[in-house]
Amino acid sequence: MRHLSIPLLTDKPVPAIGVGAMPLSDNRPDGTVIPRDQAVAVLHGAFALGMTLVDTADIYAPDGYGYGHNELAVGEAVRTWRDGRDSIVVVTKIGITRAVRNDVDVWGRDGSREHLLRAAEASVERLGFVPDAILLHRVNREQQPFATTVENMLAVRDAGFAPRIGIGNVHLDECHVAWEVSGGTIAAVENERSPRYREDADVLHWAGRHGVAYLAWSPLGGGDDARRLGDLYPEFRAVAQELSATAGHDVTAQEVALAWLSASGSGVVPIPGFTRGQTAYSSARAARLELTADQIARLDLSPAGPGSVFPDDED
Ligand SMILES: NC(=O)c1ccc[n+]([C@@H]2O[C@H](COP(=O)([O-])OP(=O)(O)OC[C@H]3O[C@@H](n4cnc5c(N)ncnc54)[C@H](OP(=O)(O)O)[C@@H]3O)[C@@H](O)[C@H]2O)c1
């Protein structure tokens, strides 16, 4: 695995490709969720392949009753990992609320100090250790000025729930505010970026200029679109075919997408989600792909998709 140095996020080596743990808590088409031991095995497989950064969140769960489901799995996987907890960069997220009322999953956002402190404490308890960073998952733009939300995240850090904080699903003006309010200590931005969705180039460049990690979520476009990536974005398949001729194995359009994201900035870490060893292996292999400047330019210019996987007005 190729590694990056991102001191604002961690002193540990940061893998070029990380793991998004969310699908390990999603309902599968048959209505079941992967059993905990299998989820832990998938994560251990990913760590063994060198993908030693894992992204989770308090709300990742099959339903509102299972709040914290994903953090429990990630916590167990990291605590039982053969190379020890300190070999893994763990990022979790707070600031979205999810509760069951009258048997309906109700989503919201809360950037209040009270909520963020309570949520961070619960995340640490579920993980069983202090994560490397806690990020604000989404911004409640109606609740208060963003500067206040950043101050509240700093309170989370000052209370000892994480040594670093970051922000997610943010616009460039919010990056400026967070940078100023935090005294230049924002560790990471987690925004959506993939062949399908490429609308925040300004945030990507801002992160690169400031040495802030950029965690690219749903880097393959999520779920079914991820599986059909080569059909939906033919230029990625064309580049995969070119690379297959010299790589000695079949390079996939998904691997090209991860390599292309990885090449888009010095601190960019795609965090694909997967539930199978085969897709974990393929994702790790993407870190070894070398794209030419011409291939990157062609991919940059190729048409993007239908928009966000989870639009900003949804949770
Ligand atoms: N901050 C946010 O607001 C936010 C929002 C959404 C997601 N996220 C984070 O981003 C992570 C990734 O997003 P996501 O899971 O929605 O979407 P994704 O990574 O774009 O797509 C996931 C799908 O891609 C497949 N896949 C993974 N690697 C592959 C490969 N190398 N080749 C072919 N298929 C591959 C997986 O299949 P299999 O299941 O069959 O392995 C899975 O179905 C999440 O896990 C979560 O941590 C953050």
Image (cartoon, grey):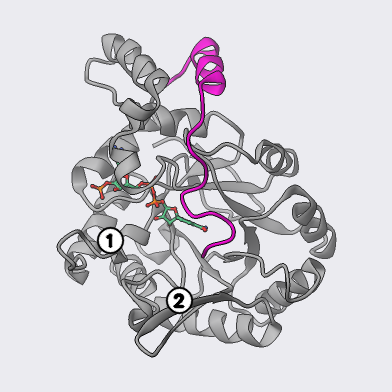
Give the amino acid at mark 2: Phe
* Image height of 55 relative to 15, above or below: below
Mark 1 residue type: Arg
Q: In which image quadrant can residue 25 be found?
A: bottom left
Q: Position of residue 21 (x, y in %)?
A: 36, 59
Q: Which mark is residue 47?
A: none
The residue positioned 47% from the left and 39% from the top of the image is: 16
Residue 24 quadrant = bottom left
Pinpoint residue 39: horizontal percent, then vertical percent: 24, 63
Q: Quadrant of the N terminus?
A: top left
Q: Say whether marks 1 and 2 touch (CB < 8 Å).
A: no
- Measured in 3D between alpha carbons, the distance from the residue under mark 1 to the one under mark 2, in whole angstroms, is 16 Å
Query: Tag 2 or tag 1, which sits nearer the N-term?
Result: 1
Q: Is residue 301 left or right of residue 239?
A: right
Task: Tell me which segment is drawn in magenta.
Answer: 290-315
| Residue matched to label 1 | 82
In the figure, residue 286 lies in which quadrant? top left
Q: Determine the secondary structure under disc 2.
A: loop
Magenta-drawn stretch, dominant element (helix, strand or loop): loop
Which residue bears the numbered disc 2?
Answer: 129
Q: Is residue 81 visible?
A: no
Residue drawn at x 79%, y 52% as measured from the top left: 173
Residue furthest to the bottom: 102
